[in-house]
Amino acid sequence: MILKLVRPKLVTFDVTGTLLMTKLEEHYTEAGLQHGLLLDPNLLAGSFKSNFKKLSLEHPIYGKHTGLGWENWWRTIVYNIFKEQDQQVCNVKLEKVASSLIKCYGTSRCWHKYPGVIELLDYLKGRGIIMGVISNFDERLESVLASTKLRPYFSFVLTSYNLGIEKPHPSIFEEALKYTKELYGTTVLPEEAVHIGDTLTNDYLGAKKAGWNAILIKRDGRAVDETKVSGKDVYRGLEELKSYFDTKFSDVSGNTM
């Protein structure tokens, strides 16, 4: 029996690590130097990762429900990173550095598009596919997407901060389907939706749990656990995804729809 391919009606994207990248060491070091503070860039990535993980556990969703709020959440990250390298650092200077970084990370100055982003979005737009964003991000995401010229491609932008829930919870994917129906008056079934992201748990498994199709972007080339993710769903970059969608946009006989 030949199964009919399901043509996607909705494609959603994660942002950080999927559509946009940042040069963490460069931006943090530069912001510090502007105010006379030195950082060892070789220690920065590890420090950022450990502090991000710790604060995410203590104040989930960027402090949305704990009263900290996203701006103070990020200020705490910046303070901790700099103080790990210099306990005597001046708090007045730290406040200036934090404010500078918070502002920068709301613009294209601190965010850069991955290769193939525009080409893929144009390809999907040309085929009439509804596109949206589902991201564990704070309130700056709208301004980030506008600044990087990506916002016009998306019918909606859902952030964990604004919704108060985050990936991999199925509810955030269900909200995307609700938004699509409200905007277009059409029902999109989970199997007609595809989510593209770079994290196994939040993006791939989260979407799968919600009944969606999912694509995992793995740019580092490391092998994935195929007990958790199908090899056919793993791509090294957005440039390769045209082949995935070419298949989806064709009928079983191979004719382009």
Image (cartoon, helix red, strand yellow):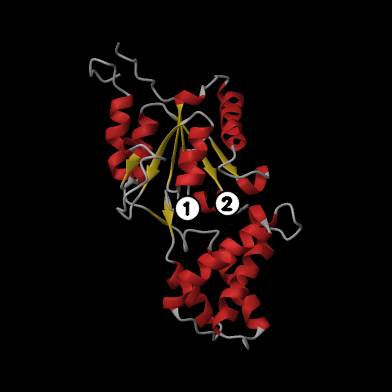
At a point 31% along the width and 36% down the height, the residue shown is: 232
Callout 2, which amino acid? Phe
Whether residue 55 is visible, yes or no, is yes
Report which residue position mark 1 lands on.
16
Q: CB under 8 Å between callouts 2 and 1?
A: yes
Q: Which mark is residue 137?
A: 2
Quarter of the image where the N terminus is located = top left
Please report the residue visible at 51 percent of the width from the left and 45 percent of the height from the top: 202
98 shown above or below 201: below
Q: Position of residue 196 (x, y in %)?
A: 43, 40
Query: What label sits on residue 109 in the rendered view?
Result: none
How much space separates mark 2 and mark 1, taking CA atoms?
9 Å
Instruction: Tell whether 167 sits left or right of 236.
Output: right
Element on which disc 2 rests: loop
Residue 88 is situated, as x and y percent measured from the top left of the image, at 63, 88
Q: Secondary structure at mark 1?
A: loop
Label 2 vs 1, first from the N-terminus: 1
